[in-house]
Image (cartoon, rainbow, N blue to C red):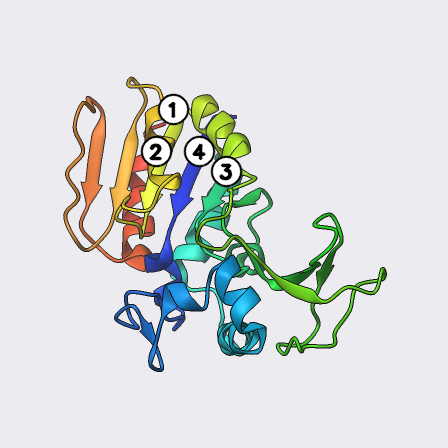
Amino acid sequence: MKKLVVLTGAGISAESGLKTFRDMGGLWEQYDVTEVASPAAWRRNPELVMRFYNERRKALFEAKPNAGHLGLAALQKQFEVVIITQNVDDLHEQAGSKQVVHLHGELRKARSTDDPNLIYTLDKWELKMGDLCEKGSQLRPHIVWFGEAVPNMSVAAEFAKQADVFAVIGTSLNVYPAAGLLDYVSKDIPVFFIDPDELPVANRKNFTFIKEKAGIGVQLMAKELEKY
């Protein structure tokens, strides 16, 4: 079974009603989003950071996978599908995707501020100051903040190297290091781009651009993938 590796970004989750930083205009209430999504912000005002992520998490608890998520899960009948996502939601998992690599963390999880290996799945949307890990330290959102390393980047790069087909859905490839994943993909394999905004891609012989939102674009890609 051939391996289809898919990089997804905020565009696919936007169709489920989840706001992106771009939707916010770079602002949340009167705050720059970088002021509530960084280690410095956590040190300065952890309550504010908690509130920001609680709002995101509450929206996720109310969201459902859309046709894009479901379409990718359905492709598992034909391919070994690996999803590499920049998104912190779990809509791919909810849709039924079995292999999902989260580059920027997971909104439904919290982790210890003292021991990053202590990670907990949340059964409610609200995380509060005073919620502690088993060692007694404060829990923080299990999110890769601006300025932090991306632990799963090496895993994602290895999958990109192994791809027989690669797809990019709902991301403008402006956010690094994720945008650099295309550099690990063989120049000879088919690459699909699904995005309503045109994205220039150089040095690709076998390249298909589908100028649609994810829900429609994944269906069109699935038809093309019948050839493989």
Looking at marks 2 and 4 on the same chain, the residue that comes earlier in the sequence is marked by 4
- Callout 3: 10 Å neighbours few (<14), some, many (20+)? many
Query: Do tag 3 and tag 4 residues touch (Cβ < 8 Å)?
Result: yes
Which secondary structure, mark 1?
helix
Q: Is residue 178 above or below residue 111?
A: above
| Callout in the foreground (1, 2) | 2
Could you tell me which residue is drawn at 57 percent across and 74 percent down? Answer: 50
Residue indicated by mark 1: 184
Of 201 and 78, which appears nearest the observer?
Answer: 201
Q: Which residue is mark 3?
A: 81
Tag 1–tag 2 contact (CB < 8 Å): yes
Which residue type carries mark 2? Gly
Indicate left or right for 184 with 76 as reference: left
Mark toward the viewer: 1 or 4: 1
The amino acid on which the numbered mark 1 sits, given as a three-letter code, is: Tyr
Under tag 4, what secondary structure?
strand
Q: Which residue is mark 4?
A: 4
Residue 129 in sight from this viewpoint = yes
First in residue order: circle 1 vs circle 4: 4
Q: Is residue 227 left or right of residue 79?
A: left
**CA gap, disc 1 and disc 3:** 17 Å
**C-alpha gap between disc 2 and disc 4:** 18 Å
Asked if disc 1 and disc 4 are in contact, CB closer than 8 Å, the reply is no
Quadrant of image for the C terminus: top left
Mark 1 surroundings within 10 Å by alpha-carbon count, few (fewer than 14), some (14 through 19), many (20 or more): some
Q: Amino acid at mark 4?
A: Leu
Question: N-terminal of the two: label 2 or label 3?
Answer: 3
